[in-house]
Image (cartoon, rainbow, N blue to C red):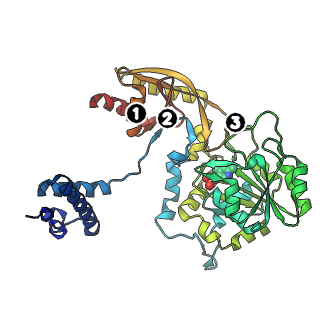
Amino acid sequence: MPLLSQLPQVDKILKEKRFEAKNHIILKKIIQDQIALLRQNLIDSKSIPDYENILQNIQKSYEQLHQIDSKPLINATGIVIQTNLGRSIFSPKLLVEIFPLLSQYNNLEYDTSKGIRADRYKSIKKYICTLFDCEDTIIVNNNASAILLIINTFAKNKEVIISRGELIEIGGSFRIPEIILSAGGILKEIGSTNKTHLKDYENAITQNSTLILKAHQSNFKQIGFTHEVALEQIITLAKNKGVIDYYDVGSGYIAGIEGINEPSLIEISKLKPSLVSFSGDKLLGGPQAGIIFGKKPLIDQLKKNHLLRALRIDKFSIFALEATLRAYMENNFELIPTISMLKQSPQTLQDKAKKLFEKLSTIQTLQCKLITVKSKAGGGSLPEKEFPSYGLSLKHNTLKTTILNTKIRQKGLIARIQNDCIILDIRCIKTSSFKTIKNIFSSIDNEK
Ligand SMILES: *Cc1c(COP(=O)(O)O)cnc(C)c1O
């Protein structure tokens, strides 16, 4: 019998009773992939598994494909806004609030009193314009989209003036200079890495300049022999020269945390900037979004740019943002986990850490210590600010720390290693996760 004739027929497998209820389009693809593998096996080793084994493999592949890969994790890193872990998280209460909007038709772009099409941003506008005392707002997909839209609308083939100290990279290969170029702007760098003066801005403005961009340094801090021009001066200069001032604030802090060494969006908005943009899911603690506010004639022009259609925010995010902003209106930080996690008092953190300590101390194989640690805001926000916190330092009696760390990570607990110990910062861990954490460590011992 020729070798390859031992391969089973796709159609025969498809007709097997056990596959009757499966999606045959997906099943066929899996069978074809399996047979391709078997063909290679036959050529290499002249043998293949028996028919029943082949069917079981196909079934296994089919089931694996249907497994849900996205899963919740426990963030024990003490970094509140972690882009890799989904940035800001939502309060279940807030999700309940928006659930009826998502599971039913709604007035996303509809005016029920007049029966006509309405602005997608109308529900957000009253909150943004009240919080920031500004003329108008527009919301896009994320802050990168906001930069793209603003530069493309006002500075296509025109000069964008920006300090060399602000040509920043945010992470994930996102860089301000590249985005200016992609948007069609001409980059006009001024000053030096550490110092830029008002006269650098003044001297740079020509007939072909339309916009001064000030970008928040976000994820790093310059110290020593440095100088940057205050936003207030840039706004005045822009007004006098007839160009637009645009401040990319990055994270955008509104309120709720004490001891922060930078102006809040509310203070920034008092300077009446032409345009400001910031992220929805960094310190604001909402969904992914790019929030733009400022002067109405400029926002009107943004709304006319055809690119907006490609950058617009979807309904999930707009409703979640609306609910987040409503929580700010009421100073209800309980509904904004990013803020409430940063606000926790040392006493609360210590009490929480003690409770987890008591739970984990009962595991014989773990050496567990209660320690003080320092949390971070993360997400390129407040890079120099440390938030004192409590946590646990853990060592296993037999397992190497790096191996223990891999095991707990694979079970959904994300920690860090310091001085050859696992460190769990209590700040972003919910009390309701304590039992799971204990089970994770116990299950590792049961596996050995
Ligand atoms: C984070 C950040 C961005 C990008 O914002 P996304 O919402 O992630 O697109 C842009 N500019 C600055 C200064 C930032 O900090």
Is residue 25 among what the camera can see?
yes
Q: Residue furthest bottom?
A: 115
Q: In this orientation, which residue lies closer to the viewer: 418 or 327?
A: 418
For marks 2 and 3, the one nearer the N-term is 2
- The relative height of residue 351 versus residue 126 in the rendered view (above or below) is above
Q: Residue furthest left?
A: 1
Q: Which mark is residue 76?
A: 2
Please, what is the three-letter code of the amino acid marked with disc 2?
Ala
Q: Mark 1 = which residue?
A: 437
Per the model, the C-alpha gap separating discs 2 and 3 is: 23 Å
Say whether residue 239 is left or right of residue 309: right
Q: Residues within 10 Å of mark 1 (few under 14, many from 20)?
A: many
Q: Position of residue 20 (x, y in %)?
A: 18, 66
Query: Neighbour class for label 2 at 10 Å: few (<14), some, many (≥20)?
Result: many
Q: Are the residues flagged by discs 1 and 2 in contact, CB closer than 8 Å?
A: yes
Residue 407's tag is: none
- Residue 397 drawn at (x, y percent): 36, 20
Of the pair 404 and 290, the residue shown nearer to us: 404
Name which quarter of the figure residue 239 lies in: bottom right
Label 3, secondary structure: give it. loop
Q: Which residue is mark 3?
A: 258
Q: Is residue 373 left or right of residue 157?
A: left
Helix, strand or loop status at disc 2: loop
The three-letter code of the residue at mark 1 reads: Ile
Quarter-of-image position of residue 317: bottom right
Residue located 23% across and 57% down the image: 40
As shown in the figure, which amino acid type bears the numbered disc 3?
Glu
Choose mark 2 or mark 3, whichever is in front.
2
Q: Mark 1 or mark 2, which has the lower sequence index?
A: 2
Mark 3 or mark 1: which comes first in sequence?
3
